[in-house]
Image (spheres, rainbow, N blue to C red):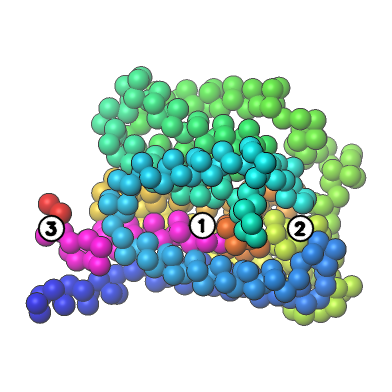
Amino acid sequence: MKSAFKKLSVNKHNIDAGLLFAVTLCAAISTLLIYSISESGLSANEGVGSSYWKTQLFSMIIGIGAAIIISLIDYRKLVKLWFIFAPAALFLVALTFTSLGYQRAGADDQAWLQIGPLNFQPSEVLKIAFILTFGYHLSRDEEDMNKPLHMLLLLIHGAVPIAIVGKQGDYGTAIVFAAIFGFMICSAKISWKYLVAAPFVIAAAVAGMWFFALNEFHKKRILILFNPGTDSDIEYQQNLGLAALKSGGVFGKGLMKNADEYVYVPEIHNDFIFTYAGQVFGFVGSIGLLIILAYICLKIFADSHITRDRLGRFICMGAFGLMLSHCILNIGMVLKVAPVIGIPLPFLSAGGTAMVSMYAIIGLVLSTYSHRAVNYNVFYDDNNDK
């Protein structure tokens, strides 16, 4: 009995506290920023009232609880439930193609579900399911993955979520899924022959998307990056975003000012929240936020190298690919070096679904960290699972 309590006592401290603190710091800053936006009335025309910051705060609390609970569950046991959560995630995404699906104001994709008073984006759940199922697939098939049939099955596994969200019109999320797939499969024992062929396959896929999937508006959003100043309508949001960042100066204007003291940017509480952070905290504060986000990404990457097994490594690399792609696409969008494709900034953009799902993914990373060398856990005991 004494030995069991000793193991439990050791395990209580066996959590990546630095990672959990960093993401919660971002979530707390997000709640503060959204509260300031709602109080200033900056986005009153978009209906951003007190309910937004309350939702963000509530989602942060739920997310912290979810991350801690998931960290207690052995990820090796969790992935074996793929036959439950994978079909459930696909079913929820499929509902977006029915009358329950709708296009959120300001978006150009039908990727949301409205069930009673609840609004959420099922693709966030699909991200979690994909990281788990693809990680499990790789861990079971890694030794044979370079055989053509096995590689084909892995490619089909990766193509399914990309195709589904692409069909919704959510091309930003499709890119995120592609990044998750890329980082996970490259962290496995993939042959150099496939890596050499990858650029040609990607080029063919991009060409196919350009000629057969993207409409003229999406194409203009991309082409404007190479011809700035030629279409004020397409550039409107990004030009305002750059002006907002510039207006913050070195140290920022501070919180809770009147709306007329800030530069308004459409979706400033959501995909363009970094522009408001730049106005409030200035250049110094913006760099500080980027450092925190970089720390989160690098910490997940570092954790992938100390996991107990290859499955844990694949899960961490999937989480790393997700966080990194979100950060690059969102900040690139704001800085006008990437097209506007509706990708939120992790733990900062408004959105309860995104907040809780990001915490759940962090929970998976925490699970791989806490189970890398432990003998006892609330939901797992090495001595009984050999």
Residue at 50% x, 32% y: name it: 160
Question: Going 64% across and 22% down the picture, which residue do you hit?
Answer: 208
Mark 3 or mark 2, whichever is nearer to me = 3
Q: Amino acid at mark 3?
A: Asn
Res. 184 visible in picture: no
Label 2 environment density (alpha carbons within 10 Å; few <14, some 14–19, many ≥20): many
| Location of residue 247 in the rendering, given as x and y in whole percent from the top left corner | 82, 67
The residues bearing labels 1 and 2 have C-alpha atoms spaced at a distance of: 20 Å
Assess whether residue 358 is covered by the magenta stretch.
Answer: yes
View extreme (front): residue: 116
Tag 2, which secondary structure? loop
Around disc 3, counting alpha carbons within 10 Å, would you say few (fewer than 14), some (14 to 19), or many (20 or more)?
few
User: Horizontally, is 266 left or right of 54 in the view?
Assistant: right
Q: Which label sits on residue 357?
A: 1
Q: Position of residue 144 (x, y in %)?
A: 27, 27
| Predominant SS along the magenta part | helix
Q: For mark 2, what is the residue?
A: 267
Q: Measuring from the top left, give residue 59's x and y in whole percent.
A: 56, 67
Q: Residue at x 45, y 56 (%)?
A: 361
Crowd band around label 1 with a 10 angstrom C-alpha radius: few (<14), some (14–19), many (20+):
many
Q: Are marks 1 and 3 in contact (CB under 8 Å)?
A: no
Q: Which residue is mark 3?
A: 384
The CA span between labels 1 and 3 is 31 Å
